[in-house]
Amino acid sequence: MSHRLFVTGTDTGVGKTAVSAGLLRAWGDAGYRTAGMKPVASGCARTGDGLRNADALALMAAMTEPAPYEAVNPVALEPAIAPHIAAGEAGVTLDAHTLAAAAGRLPPADLLVVEGAGGWRVPLGPEETFADIARHLRAEVVLVVGIRLGCINHALLTAEAVHADGLALAGWVACCVEPAVDRREAQLATLAQRMEAPCLGIVPYLGEVAPAAVAGILQRAGGVPERPSPSPPA
C-alpha cells in the first residue's frame, strides 16, 4: 500500500463511514486503486454468510479492488456496544499488531483507508486502543468532526492526542450531523483557525449521506491528489 489513511472521529455517529467511503470513491474516481478496512466492527447483523457490518459493506461498495468480506472486516462482533466489551463477551482478544497486519490480506492498492470505531482512544483491551492500530500501520490520520455543541474541544483534544502519539494529521472533515446547529459558521471558523491541519471538506446535513456526495465535496476541496500523467514513450 503506497498511502494509508486512518479515519477517526470526535465521537461515534459523526460520519466516519461516509467520509471513509467518500475518500475511497474520490480516489477511485481520480484513477487510483483503493482498498478499505474496518478492523473491528461491533453491531453486526447475522446473515446467511455470517456476521456482517453495514460500515464494512459500505467500504466494500466504494473501493475499487475486490476483496472478501473477512479481509475488509477481520473481527465482526454482534452486540452494538464498545468493541472491547463485545470482544470480551465473545472470548476474542483484540491485538493492535495483529489487526494492522491483517491489512496484508487486502489486494495491492494506491490507497488504503482504515476506519476506526468511535474516537481516537476507544479501547481494544486493557492497554491498547484503536490509535495503536494506526501507529502500527504508520498511517496518516483523517479526523471527522461532528459539528455540534462541544465539537471544538473534542476536535482539538483529538488532534493533540494524534500528534502526541507521533502520527501526522492529514486533515479534518466537518460533518454537519444535526439539521440545525447554533453558530455553525462560527464553530467552523474557530476550527479552521485552531486546527493545525487542512480542512478536507465540509459535509452539510444530508440525512442519509451518500459516498458519492462526500467524494464530490472532497474533490472540490482539493483533498484528492492528481494522478500524474503517464510519461511519454522515449
Image (tube, rainbow, N blue to C red):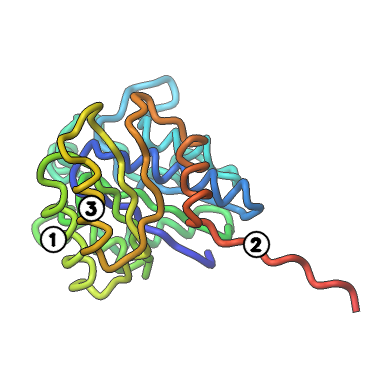
What residue would you read off at disc 3? Answer: 94
Out of 5 and 109, give the one closest to the viewer: 5
Callout 3: helix, strand or loop?
A: loop
Q: Is disc 3 in contact with disc 1, using a CB cutoff of under 8 Å?
A: no
Picture layout, residue 91 above or below residue 107: above
Residue picked out by circle 2: 227
Furthest residue to the bottom?
234
The earlier-in-sequence mark between 2 and 1 is 1
For disc 2, the neighbor class at 10 Å (few under 14, some 14 to 19, many from 20) is few
Residue 67 position within the rendered picture, expressed as x and y whole percent measured from the top left: 55, 44
- Please name the amino acid that badge 3 sits on: Leu
Instruction: Say which residue appears at 58% left-offset and 57% top-offset.
Output: 109
Disc 1 element: helix
Quadrant of the rendering where the C terminus is positioned = bottom right
The residues bearing labels 3 and 1 have C-alpha atoms spaced at a distance of: 25 Å
Residue 128 in view here = yes
Neighbor class of circle 1 (other Cα within 10 Å; few <14, some 14-19, many 20+) is: few
**Horizontally, is 30 left or right of 92 in the view?**
right
Up-down: is 46 above or below 201?
above
* Residue 178 horizontal/vertical position (percent): 23, 30
Residue in the foreground of this view, choosing between 182 and 195 = 182
